[in-house]
Amino acid sequence: MDTTFNFTRFLKILSNEWRLNLKKMLLFWGVMIISAVIYFAFFRVDSEIVSKSQTFMLFFPLMCILQGFYLQIYYREFSSKTKTQALLLLPASRNETFWAKFLLGIILYGILFAAFLFILIKWNGIYNEKIMTLKAFPVTDWRYGAFERYQTLEVNLMIILSVFLIYLFFVSAYLFGIMSFKKLAAFKSLALWFIIIMGLVLITCIVYALFTGVWPSIAVPGINLITERGKYGCVMINIYPEILYGLGLFICLALIFISRIKYNEKTI
C-alpha cells in the first residue's frame, strides 16, 4: 500500500468522507441540540437559577463520552473484515485516509463541541437573567446576591489546559480502542480505560498510605489528596503542574501515535 501523502488525493478522500458521513453527523448534532432543548424545557422547568459551571459540568463529560461513538463512525471500516477490505481498495495512501478521518472525526468534532458548549453556556446565562427579571427577587434574597457568581464561569490558563487535556485523553483513548477492538469498540474502550484508571487510583492510594500511614479518601493525581482525618492534604497540581500536564500530554500523543501505527497494521 502506498504510504506517500498527496494533497489532491487527500482532499478527494476528505470530500468522500464528508459525503458518506454528513447525514450521520447532522443526526448526531441534531440529537445534541434536542438534548439541550430538553434540558432547558424540562430539567429547568422549576425556573430556578442554575450556574454556568453546572451546565458546563453536565454537558462536557457527556460530549467527551460521545466522542468515541462519533469517532467510530469515521473508522467504521475496522468493524468487519469486508469493510476493511473495501478500505484497501481506495486509491489513496494510509496517511491520507487516516488523517482525513482524524480531521473530520476529531478536529471538526472538537470545534463543533466547543461551539456547542459556548452557545449552551450563553443560553444558560440568558435564561438566568430572564428568571431574575420575571421573579424580581428582592435585594435581600440570597439568590439576588449570588446571581453574579452564578453568571460567571471561572476561566484561567490552568483550567483551559486541564479541560483540553481531558478532552484529548478521551480522543486518544477512544482512538486506541477503535484500533484495538472490532465490535463495540467505543464501549470496550470505555471499559478498558475505566479499569486502567481505577487501577492507577488504587496504586496511588496504596503509595500514599505507605508514606503517610493513612488511607486517603481521594487520591487522584492532580486532585486534592485528602485523608480520612483531613491531614496531609495537598494539591499535586499546584506542586508539580508542569510535570503533570507534560505527562498527560505525552500519554495522549503517544496513544495517538500508537493508534496510527496500529492503523497501518490493520491495512497491511
Image (tube, rainbow, N blue to C red):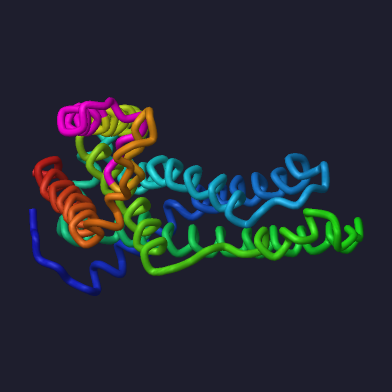
Query: In this rendering, is residue 148 above or below 215?
Result: below
Residue 41 point in image, percent of width and height: 78, 45
Nearest the viewer among 141 and 153 is 141
In-image side of 124 versus 103 (left or right): right
Q: Left of 141 or right of it: where is 102?
A: left
Magenta residues span: 202-221
Residue 186 image-quadrant placement: top left
Residue at 82% across / 48% down in the picture?
A: 47
From the viewer's perspective, tell me whether residue 44 is left or right of residue 89. right
Q: x, y percentage for residue 233?
A: 33, 42
Image coords of residue 121 (percent x, y): 62, 60
State the residue lying farthest toward the bottom.
Answer: 8
In the rendered image, which quarter is residue 9 located in?
Answer: bottom left
Residue at 31% across / 47% down in the picture? 234
- The answer to whether residue 97 shows anywhere in this view is no
Closer to us: 35 or 89: 35
Q: Residue at x 63, y 58 (%)?
A: 120
Image quadrant where one finds the C terminus = top left
Task: From the top left corner, tell me how far across and down residue 42 is, in percent.
Answer: 77, 40
Q: Is residue 109 magenta?
A: no
Kindly identify the residue that appears in the image at 27 percent across and 32 percent down.
201
Is the residue 88 above or below the residue 130 in the image?
Answer: above
User: Is 211 a magenta residue?
Assistant: yes
* Visible residue check, residue 236: yes
Query: Closest to the observer: 226 or 118?
Result: 226
